Image (cartoon, helix red, strand yellow):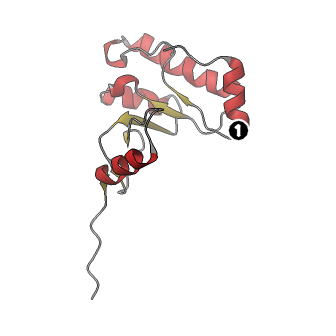
Amino acid sequence: GQTATEEEILEVRARGATLGAHTLHHVDMTALPDPELQHQIRRSRQRLEAYGQEFLAYAYPWGHHTIREVRAVREEGFSCAVEIGAAISLRMPDLYRLSRLDIQRDVELPDFVRMVTKTMRVPSLPKAL
């Protein structure tokens, strides 16, 4: 897909949405040499900062990452990162491996509710005495 235009970014920001980075060119980070990996992550962060982004979230393209990419994203100053997951966890997560559901534009509310409730992992609660 194409990246958002400056006008689209400003409109989204004006509506209160938080932007997140996703590399410059939507590349498989695991296939990049270290210098290119750092460049892709750093430039995507700098683009967010240019729009006044305070909370810096990162999304691994296609969910592809290893410990090397996790470390690089953390070291570049992002607050958290998301991967493509099949579940929503209510447990204390690893902030650089947060699961997310892939919700497309054409998903209707009943399907959305089904997706969320089907995939939610609720931590065990202690039994009442």
Q: Position of residue 17 (x, y in %)?
A: 63, 38
Q: Amino acid at mark 1?
A: Arg
Image side of residue 11 versus residue 70, left or right = right
Foreground of the two, 58 or 7:
7
2 is higher (above) or lower (below) than 91: above
In this view, the residue in front, 126 or 13, is 13
Q: Residue at x 34, y 50 (%)?
A: 114
Q: Residue at x 36, y 10 (%)?
A: 33
Crowding near the residue tagged with mark 1, few <14, some 14–19, many ≥20 C-alpha atoms within 10 Å: few
Which image quadrant is residue 28 in?
top left
Residue drawn at (48%, 19%), measured in percent from left and top? 23
Element class at badge 1: loop
Q: Which residue lies at the image location 44% right of the left edge and 32% below the top edge? A: 104
Q: Nearer the viewer, residue 70 or 16?
A: 16
Quadrant of the drawing holding the C terminus: bottom left
Location of mark 1 (residue): 15
Q: Which of the 4 quarters of the picture holds residue 45?
A: top right
